[in-house]
Amino acid sequence: MARASLRLDFAGRRWSLVAAAVCLLPLLLQLPMPLPVAIALAGILSAAMASRRATPGWLRAILALAVFGLILAQGGMQFGRDTGCALLAGMLAIKPSELRTVRDARSLLGFALFAPFATFLLDQGPLSLVLGLAGAVLALAALARLSEQESGLPAADVRHAARIGVVTRLIAIGLPLALAAFWLFPRLATPLWGIPDLSAARPGLSDEMSPGDWLDLIVDDSPAMRVTFNGATPSTREMYWRGPTLTHYDGRTWTASPWLRALPPAPVEHGAPMWEYEIALEPTDRNLLVALEMPVEFPDGMRAAHEYTLTSTRRLDRVTRWQLRSAPPVRFEADLPEALRRTALQLPADFNPRTRALARQWRAETDDDGALVDRALAWIRSDFAYTLDTPLPGRHAVDEFLFDYRAGFCEHFSSAFAVLMREAGIPTRVVTGYTGGIRNRYGDYWIVRRMDAHAWNEVWLEDRGWVRVDPTAAVAPERIYDTLEDRLGAGGGADAVMPVADLGDWARRAWNDFVLGFDANRQQRMLQRIGFDNVEPARLIALFSLCAALALGWMLWLVARAERERDPLLRAWHRLGRRYARLGLARARHEPALAWALRVQAARPGEQALVALTRRFAAARYARPASDATLVRALRAHRPARETDR
């Protein structure tokens, strides 16, 4: 029987299943519910079915179809990165159903090693790295256990810790080369494999807003960005992080006007105070940026449209940092050109008749635009409620919101307010972005989460220009300006959760700074700290090659050292032989130890001690299983006899 066809013993089976499960764990943590639970149950069922007898092929086919059907249904029958990773997890969970032989175990472990790498397509955080590394170590240790079974070595002869220790040492040997490649290899603007669409970015803010689009975003508590202020810090009520501005409305969807992006930024008269800060933006699948209202200047790589929609010159598919300065606006485009006025008053025909009638009634009662704005806010404040549980609107979405259910979230309030004001003849637009933030007590920075996504309005008033109006804050200010402590409630819940959450986010921020955010600029700054200024790519490659050569040399030295004898008695004996070799009395490879000692004594009559030591060595080496510590010390201390001792 071939070794690969050996029936898997209990120890090998246990090692293989545990290693595969640990490899699968980080990938399961990135999948949406209920896929992780279903895949984990499928894996347990597959392992249990194959533990006693071979699983029939028809049963494996049914299990595979059930798992794959659930994955495709969860993904909406769309094939992409997320669906592919989920299918990989499902196949790995079903693989133990055919675990019978050593060959099957090797196939399972080789397949399992793909799971940690697939995880990095979805998340590149420290937890994913630690779990992936643990899975890889256990998989290599399991492969070592399979080799031991093939060699006939019982599992009890090697301790589990020793097996894992060997694998860990092998990984440590290659660590310097890996670090040299990470820190010194020239950084490229795009991935080496040239498929940027496979980035692990999440969807971010969009340049359009339709009913229901924001529900997934405003229930996502993952960080959107982290902000560090240098000096003065605004209050949370002043933290309006301006993103895309939406001016066109078709009766259902608000979108940005493409032609406004070609115009230079509108004039802004800034007030006080001035805020200086750095934004560390989490990866998204777009190139839209945000800034605290209103940015004073724009760093390299950032562009501003006429209405201050900020974009990057490239897609933000990795952690990026932006140094900015902002100040509150005093006047924002005080002179509004007629073309822009018409754009800010545009509405589709034959939509929302009740809203049109109400706006005309209000306009007939006053010519004061500010009074109309205040009247609308007072109505919202008194008669409306904040909720995420809203029905999908029909054709007349604004009418239904204002006159029927009168409850919604920022998407509904900002859209309805804009339509009402435009019908009354007041130029209005929708601004999207984030509001507020949570201060991290350990890192002294602010976390803005995706659930802080918000939409508000700007109305144009004579002599003031564009003025921010937030109708959602009129009805639910606690939703706009609260902190995470407020959301958890006062008392022990927040006191217990916040320090742990802050510490975890601080660790994630450090990971972003030193690993995910390590780009060409940070590489140059690192080299400058150690005395290398303006290192060109050619010199950087030379530096990397030198460090890689040193790392490879160190690896070869460690490997060569590991190949030497591990028996201290044998090492001491060979060291003694090298002392006599320097005198021209080296032992031949075929020469027995005692014959060599007698030959040395014949050449140097004073070597009686060498003969006695050699007899003790032969007895300890071949007659007793254990090494003699006293003999080891005697061999180390022995020196060739001097000429006067002959």
Image: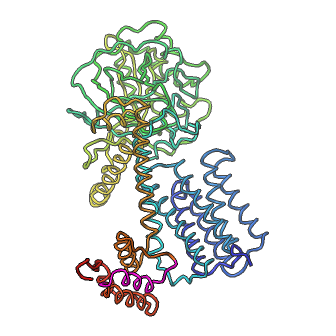
* Left or right side of 73 for 187: left
Residue 564 in picture, x, y percent from top left: 44, 70
- Can residue 634 be found in the magenta stretch? no
Quarter of the image where one finds residue 537: top left
Q: Is residue 484 visible?
A: yes
User: Is residue 180 or residue 434 the one in the foreground?
Assistant: 180
- Can residue 591 be found in the magenta stretch? yes
The residues colored magenta run 590-606
Quarter of the image where one finds residue 101: bottom right
Compared to 89, does 278 lie above or below?
A: above
User: Is residue 175 or residue 356 the one in the foreground?
Assistant: 175
Report the residue that reaches farthest toward the right: 58
**Residue drawn at the location 27% of the way across and 83% of the way down:** 646
**Residue drawn at the location 53% of the way across and 26% of the way down:** 254
Q: Quadrant of the N terminus?
A: bottom right
Residue 477 in picture, x, y percent from top left: 34, 38
User: Is residue 369 or residue 313 the one in the foreground?
Assistant: 313
Q: Is residue 402 visible?
A: no
Residue 59 in picture, x, y percent from top left: 76, 70
